[in-house]
Amino acid sequence: MADQPNKLTHIDQAGEAHMVDVGDKAETARSATAEGFVRMLPETLALIREGNAKKGDVIGTARLAGIMAAKKTSDLIPLCHPLMLTKVSVEISEDDSLPGLRVTATAKLTGRTGVEMEALTAVSVTCLTIYDMAKAADKAMEIGGIRLLEKTGGKSGHYKA
């Protein structure tokens, strides 16, 4: 089924969930980049910018949480393969037009399966950590826009949103 376009690769012929066998796939350089945002009150963004959030360094802590989450993706998503990532980066930038913070994460490896889920997990957990660290000031923050921006490598080739 994995070779057929527009088919769910984690569903077998009987319609049951299963882990995809990647043993016969070629090892290639693979990367994925995902993005998301946390919208908040301008006052909350100012607290984070000034380093005055009650729980401490929001940006640094959230970046580390995202990197750690990418490494644990297979523990969180049942059918993901455990991967030996070679790089995970998380960038967090202010966006006054939200207002809030934009998060971009990139995961890389050389292997038999892609790293889209690792990049998406990194963004999700980074956004959740920002929320956790600033919720005392702003419980109405909104997490959104989490999506895959780009992926390279593998049989399906290059994808760009």
Image (cartoon, grey):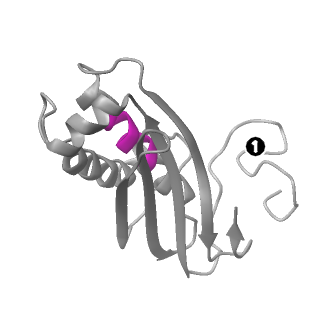
Packing grade of label 1 (10 A; few <14, some 14-19, many >=20) is some
Which residue bears the numbered disc 1?
A: 11
Q: Quadrant of residue 13?
A: top right
What is the x, y in percent for residue 38? 43, 37
Q: Is residue 81 visible?
A: no
Q: Quadrant of residue 54?
A: top left
**Taking 95 as reference, is 5 above or below it?**
below
Classified by dominant secondary structure, the portion drawn in magenta counts as: helix
Quadrant for the N terminus, please.
bottom right
Is residue 13 highlighted in magenta? no
**Taking 32 as reference, is 127 above or below it?**
above
Left or right of 126? Residue 109 is right
Task: Please give the name of the residue rendered at 41% of the width and 25% of the height, measured from the top-left corner.
Answer: 141
What is the x, y in percent for residue 40? 40, 30
What segment carries the magenta color? 123-130
What is the x, y in percent for residue 128? 37, 34
The type of residue carrying mark 1 is Ile
**Taking 157 as reference, is 47 above or below it?**
above
Residue nearest the viewer, comparing 97 with 144: 97
What is the x, y in percent for residue 89? 35, 64
Q: Is residue 12 visible?
A: yes
Left or right of 15? Residue 86 is left
